[in-house]
Amino acid sequence: DPFIAGGPTANSMTGALFLLIRTQQISSEVFTCPSSSAEKDNFGGGTNSALNHSNFTDLGKNLSYSYANPYPDTAAVGRGYRLNSSMTPDFAVMADRNPGTTKGDPAAVLSNATQSDMQKINSQNHNGDGQNVLFAEGHVEFVNNPFVGINKDEIFCRSTDAANPPAKTTTTGSPYDGNDSFMLPRD
């Protein structure tokens, strides 16, 4: 049982996504964007299956999407963060993989930046041209910049005050409040 010895860490973002593969008969291919270099997880080959694992075999290779952090801290919950059916329709729930700081500092780029600067902080799944984003009401849209959350919150950064963008940081961790769509994992 992968959940006993050496199992996932508490509040594992990617472990939560992997549970969909383990429990819902979803193929690992669902978590690889066709426009990325990601490969579907074969769980080590042979007779191995998702049931032998608690997480993706290689996060950089087998997961090309990010998800709104489902593990808010107490302060975020107190400021209204809930990842449930009561989210506003424009809350970004999932997107192409968060680029982290691989091409540039997302906290340094403002929403009115040039497209060449946006390419540095867009998902690398589409060569920096933009990302597909799943919104809470169910539609998916390809957008050419990451400023698509509530109040044009940047979805690849944790906000320090989502009501007053561009107050943002590149730290990992909890979302700030109910308006902060913070996508993890990041490259």
Image (tube, rainbow, N blue to C red):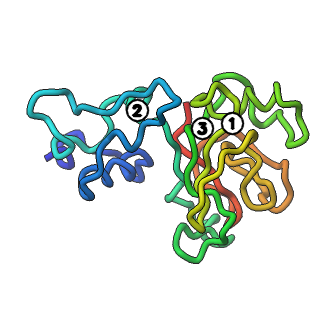
Dot 3 amino acid type: Asn
- Indicate which disc, 2 or 1, sits on the residue closer to the N terminus: 2
Tell whether 146 sits left or right of 78: right
Tell whether 79 sits left or right of 86: right
Residue 8 horizontal/vertical position (percent)? 31, 45
Choose top left, top right, bottom left or bottom right for residue 157. Answer: top right
Choose top left, top right, bottom left or bottom right for residue 117. Answer: top right
State which mark lies toward you, 3 or 1. 1
Q: Nearer the viewer, residue 169 or 22?
A: 22
Q: Nearer the viewer, residue 107 or 89?
A: 89
**Dot 2 corresponds to which residue?**
59
Give the structural element (helix, strand or loop) at label 3. loop
Residue 136 horizontal/vertical position (percent)? 59, 65
In this rendering, is residue 21 above or below 103?
below
Give the structural element (helix, strand or loop) at label 2. helix
Tell whether 180 sits left or right of 96: right
- Indicate which disc, 3 or 2, sits on the residue closer to the N terminus: 2
Q: Residue at x 47, y 23 (%)?
A: 37
Q: Quick one: label 1, few (<14), some, or many (20+) residues within 10 Å?
A: many
Dot 2 amino acid type: Leu
**Dot 1 corresponds to which residue?**
130
The answer to the question of whether label 3 and label 2 lie on touching residues, with beta carbons closer than 8 A, is: no
Tell whether 7 sits left or right of 45: right
Q: CA distance from mark 2 to mark 1?
A: 21 Å
Dot 1 amino acid type: Gly
Q: Nearer the viewer, residue 164 or 20?
A: 20
**Dot 3 corresponds to which residue?**
98
